[in-house]
Image (tube, helix red, strand yellow):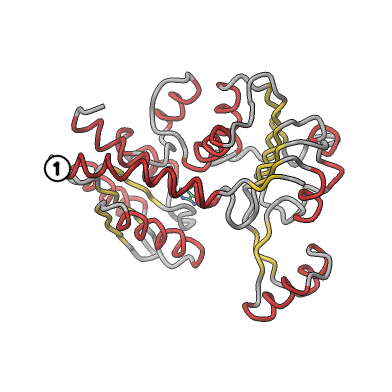
Amino acid sequence: MARIIDGNRIREQIKGELKPRVSRLAARKRVPGLAVVLVGNHAASEVYVRNKVKTCQELGMCSEQITPPDSISTEELLLIVDELNAREDVDGILVQLPLPKQVDTKRILLAISPEKDVDGFHPYNVGCLVAALPAPRACTPAGILQLLKRYQIPIAGKRAVVVGRSDIVGKPVALLLLHEHATVTICHSKTADLAGVCREADILVAAMGRPAMVTADFIKPGATVIDVGTNSLETRQDVARIFRNSAERLAAFDKRGRVLVGDVDPIDVVEKSAAYTPVPGGVGPLTIAMLMANTVESAERRLGVC
Ligand code: GUN
C-alpha cells in the first residue's frame, strides 16, 4: 500500500520549530512582519492570502494585508512596494500573483528588495538558487524538498522528472532536486513521449495544472509522486470519471458544486506509487509553512542573529 505523505503533519512540525525562533525575536522587540499585497478580488488568491495572515497570527508574527483595486497601474504598485521596502518593521513582502493584465509583473518582482523577497521570485534570488548560494527559496519547491527529506525519501542518485516549467514551481524544484544530486529531467507540453519519460522517474513531480493528467501509465511502480496541482472540477461528469463514481466525492460535489483534484489521477497513484502527496493535504500546507520560515529567516538575518 502506498504511503501517504501528510503535508498537514509536516506543516505543524515546521510551525513548531519556528515558534521558539519567533519568541526569541519578539524578546528582542523584533517580531517578524509579513506584508501581503493582494490586488483586486481574485477568489482563489483571497483564500491563499487569508490562510497566510491566519498562520502569521498562530505563530505570533505580524502581518499586514494591502488590497489595492484591480485598476492599479504598475507605477502605483511600485510606490506601494517602495514603501514596504523602506519600512523597518516589514521583513517579508509578498505580492500575490497573478496580477491584473495592465501591471508589469516582472517590474514589480524586480522592485521588491531581494532581502525581503520571501517568495524567492526576485531575479537576484533566482540567481542564488542557480548558483546554490543561500537566499530565500520559492515556497512550494522548498516545501516539496522538506516533504522528501522529512519522509527520508532518498534523492541522491535517483531519477527525478518534473512535469511543468513554471518560474514558481517547475524550474526551481528541478534545481533544488539537482542540488540534492538527483538526475533531473524537466518536461512540458511539447515533450515527446511524456508518459515514457515520466515512467523513468523515481521521484515524479507533477506541476502542470492539468486535472488528473498523470495516469497509471506515467508512473513507475514504487515511485514517489509529488502532486502540486490544485484543480477545481466543476462538472458532475468530470468528478464521476476521475473519481470512478465515488459516492463520497459525488456527494461532496453535490454539496459544494466543485471538487478539488491534483495533476495526478488519484486512484492510479494510490495503486502504483510507493508514496504520494494527496490533494488536498499534501504539498499545499507546505507552501505557507515555508513562507513563514522565509519571513522568520529574513527577520533573523536583518537583526544579524543568523
Ligand atoms: N500565486 C500562486 N502561488 C503563489 C506564490 O507562491 N506566491 C505568490 N506571490 N503568488 C502566488
Q: Position of residue 239 (x, y in %)?
A: 76, 69
Residue type pointed to by label 1: Ala
Q: Position of residue 26 (x, y in %)?
A: 17, 45
- Disc 1 element: helix
Residue 191 visible? The answer is yes
**Left or right of 37: which side holds 304?**
left
Residue 87 visible? The answer is no
Q: Is 78 rendered above or below residue 162?
A: below
Q: Position of residue 94 (x, y in %)?
A: 37, 48
Q: Is 89 rendered above or below residue 266?
A: above
Q: Position of residue 258 (x, y in %)?
A: 65, 72
Identify which residue is drawn at 67% across, 75% down. Answer: 252
Residue farthest along the bottom direction in this orientation: 255
In which quadrant will I find the C terminus? top left
Residue labelled with disc 1: 27
Identify which residue is drawn at 83% across, 37% down. Answer: 221
